[in-house]
């Protein structure tokens, strides 16, 4: 008998559920929808028959953009499958999660940019967490070694981007740029210490978090996107942006990375300064007059054309995921506030405004994200990391509810 495609199998499950008389919550419906849509995505990728084809976004002509192994987004598609497996318990997803994870293996040796944490953490990191596969743990440690080569001791940071001769970064006068996104890669370093007992990974992560805490943030709690250091003296040379609308603006996904990154840093260190940074930057976002009522931010809080500027669903998904974790580190009143805010974000993202109809949107779950409006790159499109953090947030919401029910 011919095996049912992921789409057909998932559609049958959804049909049975919808006709069973069962009343489903919005988050259960969101998971069912994701299972169907990502099942379609798997079917498409498998039909291409290529060794590496991870769906990343949609191109201007409407076709799906597939990235290569060196792209910073290469780990998010396998990571999405790990989370979808965890949310559904559907074991048919496992061989595909493994297949697409192992296709990213060469990324663990990448040393010419900082995003190996995103690439290996989302794929091999989740794979190890769910399977205990020792080979996956080895990939995490090797990736942390690669990331460690980018540490610049005089500045105390992990350099984000190289500045190649003749590059746009050289034209901007940068020497050692560090972006707020890099806070997200520190989780890889902390995990490598857990796996090996080698505190050097931990120490580099803390050094980077401390210097970023000192240099990246403004008095109102918002963060700059790019800090350019002198790698010899360690001094700050410039405070700039690459993806925001101005050097002084609050690029939305950057604020999301800061909230999430310092939540992880607090989890791993119990340093109250990190907790205060995560909560302070969230307060900035929450109270900003340009935060829309549906809590899905414009691509930049200071974008000049608000309210006619594109939204960034990816920033919203990252904030929601961070808040579900952050709710466990604060008092009861704040905890309830953070969960309610995350729920509001997720209900917006799960609505027809942001969740694509099945089979549309390049078979990505979410619509309306932005990579870089100043560069004219991927504006008002789906992004694979928006889907990844959306599913992570759904998983964290369920984990919180399970914990709450056990404590009743």
Image: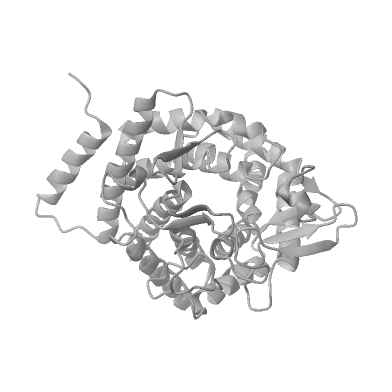
Q: Residue at x 45, y 57 (%)?
A: 369
User: In this image, 160 relative to 387: left or right?
Assistant: right
| Residue reaching furthest to the right | 233
Q: Quadrant of residue 106?
A: top right
Q: Eyeballing the image, is 51 above or below 65?
A: above
330, 167: nearer the viewer: 167
The residue depicted at 62 percent of the width and 55 percent of the height is 181
Dividing the picture into quadrants, the one containing residue 223 is bottom right
Q: Residue at x 45, y 49 (%)?
A: 383
Q: Position of residue 350 (x, y in %)?
A: 32, 59
Please name the residue shown 56% across and 33% down the image. Answer: 69
Q: Nearer the viewer, residue 271 or 76?
A: 76
Q: Position of residue 343 (x, y in %)?
A: 37, 66
Image quadrant holding the C terminus, namely bottom left
Q: Is residue 405 above or below residue 182?
A: below
Above or below: residue 383 compared with residue 99: below
Q: Is residue 138 visible?
A: no
- Whole-percent x, y for residue 154 in the image: 86, 53
**Front-most of residues 280 and 174:** 174
The structure's colour scheme is one colour
Residue extending furthest toward the top: 1
């Amino acid at each position: 008998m011919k095996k049912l495609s992921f789409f057909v199998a998932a559609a049958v499950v959804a049909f049975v559920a919808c006709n069973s008389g069962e009343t489903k919550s919005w988050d259960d419906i969101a998971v069912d929808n994701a299972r169907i849509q990502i099942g379609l995505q798997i079917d498409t990728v498998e039909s291409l028959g290529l060794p590496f084809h991870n769906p990343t976004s949609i191109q201007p002509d409407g076709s799906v953009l597939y990235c290569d192994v060196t792209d910073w987004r290469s780990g998010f598609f396998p990571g999405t499958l790990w989370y979808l497996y965890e949310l559904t318990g559907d074991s048919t997803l496992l061989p595909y999660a493994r297949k697409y994870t192992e296709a990213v293996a060469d990324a663990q040796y990448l040393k010419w940019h900082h995003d190996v944490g995103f690439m290996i953490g989302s794929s091999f990191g989740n794979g190890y967490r769910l399977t205990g596969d020792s080979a996956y743990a080895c990939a995490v440690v090797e990736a942390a070694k690669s990331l460690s080569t980018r540490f610049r001791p005089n500045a105390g940071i992990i350099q984000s981007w190289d500045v190649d001769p003749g590059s746009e970064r050289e034209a901007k006068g940068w020497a050692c740029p560090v972006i707020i996104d890099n806070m997200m890669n520190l989780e890889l370093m902390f995990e490598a210490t857990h796996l090996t007992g080698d505190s050097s990974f931990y120490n580099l992560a803390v050094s980077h978090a401390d210097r970023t805490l000192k240099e990246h943030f403004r008095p109102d709690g918002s963060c700059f996107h790019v800090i350019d250091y002198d790698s010899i003296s360690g001094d700050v040379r410039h405070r700039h942006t690459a993806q925001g609308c101005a050097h002084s603006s609050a690029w939305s996904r950057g604020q999301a990375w800061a909230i999430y990154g310092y939540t992880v840093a607090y989890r791993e260190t119990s340093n109250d300064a990190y907790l205060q940074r995560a909560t302070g930057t969230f307060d900035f976002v929450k109270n900003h007059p340009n935060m829309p009522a549906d809590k899905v931010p414009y691509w930049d809080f200071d974008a000049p054309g608000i309210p006619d500027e594109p939204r960034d669903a990816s920033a919203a998904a990252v904030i929601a995921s961070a808040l579900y974790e952050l709710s466990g580190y604060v008092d009861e009143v704040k905890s309830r506030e953070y969960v309610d805010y995350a729920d509001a974000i997720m209900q917006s993202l799960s609505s027809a405004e942001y969740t694509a109809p099945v089979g549309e949107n390049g078979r990505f779950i979410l619509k309306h994200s932005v990579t870089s409006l100043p560069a004219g790159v991927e504006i008002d499109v789906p992004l694979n990391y928006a889907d990844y953090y959306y599913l992570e947030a759904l998983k964290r919401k369920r984990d919180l509810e399970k914990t709450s029910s056990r404590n009743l």
